[in-house]
Image (cartoon, grey):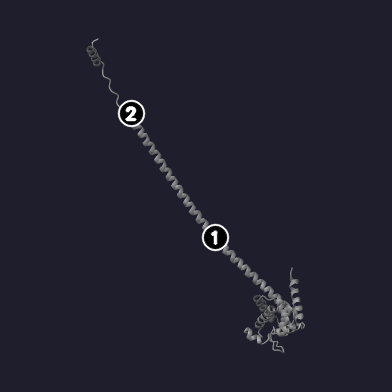
Amino acid sequence: MDPAHTLSAVSTLEAAVPAVPAVTGAPRSLSHARLLAASLGLNTVLGVGMAAAALTFHQQLEQLSLRAQQDAAANERHLQSLAALADQSTELQAGLVDVRTAVSSHAREESLFLKMLILKPSLDQTLARRIARSVQSECLLFGQDPNLVLAIMVTESDFNPNAVSNQGATGLMQVMPHWKKVLGLQELTEPEVSIRAGIQILGFYQQMYRDLDLAVTAYNRGPGPVDGALVRGASPANGYAAKVLGTYEKLKSFDVAARP
């Protein structure tokens, strides 16, 4: 066939076949829009959910913080209550100690009072109580044994506050006049003055000799004769210490007998 006729026929055929409309991109654009909308909706939902979760978490944090503050305040009140109870307990214990001390001190004074009446039944009771009170307080102050002080006192003066020896020793504890200046004393016939001075002098000799027999002997004879006898290798004993310590043991035995 002639090429020219062929081209003509093709052209005729093309003209006879109706034209098919071209497929546009509208469906694809619609799909993208729907996906975009869905994505936006999902993001919105997620955003709202996260915001709600954040709000809830924040509220929970606030509640926990408030509860912690309340617990801390409760603990502080509890600690204050415990501290107050501890203070009250300390005060009560101190009060009990004071009561026990007072009762114990009174009991010891009463014991000394009775011991003096045993040693000297005719002793004036008012004077005996005055002596007992002074001996108890001064012995507690200077760390001395009240039984020993009473033993020296009854041996020295027989509980006579106005007693004066041939050597000038005066009062219940027969204190020599030169001690008035050394210890700054006033009236040696006053029971309290004599008792305090005698206890101090006895303590001085106890520290000097570190021996009770020698200390008691020096209280009676003075340190000069005691030291002189010791230097010569002789005994300074003159019977005084034996008498005092015998009475001392007797007074201590009353304490043992009184124990339950």
The amino acid type found where label 2 is placed reads Arg
Give the mark, 1 or 2, whose residue is nearer the N terminus: 2
Q: Residue at x 51, y 54 (%)?
A: 71
Q: Would you say 70 lies left or right of 156 here?
A: left
Which mark lies nearer to you, 1 or 2? 2
Foreground pick, 32 / 258: 32
User: In screen coordinates, is 246 left or right of 10?
Assistant: right
> Which residue: 69% across, 74% down?
108
User: Going 49% across and 52% down the picture, which residue do you hit?
Assistant: 68
The picture places residue 215, in percent across and down from the top left corner, at 71, 80
- Quadrant of residue 22 within the rendered picture: top left
The quarter holding residue 227 reads: bottom right
- Residue at 48% x, 50% y is 64
Q: In which quarter of the image is the C terminus?
A: bottom right
Would you name the residue on which mark 2 appears? 28
Residue 11, above or below 95: above
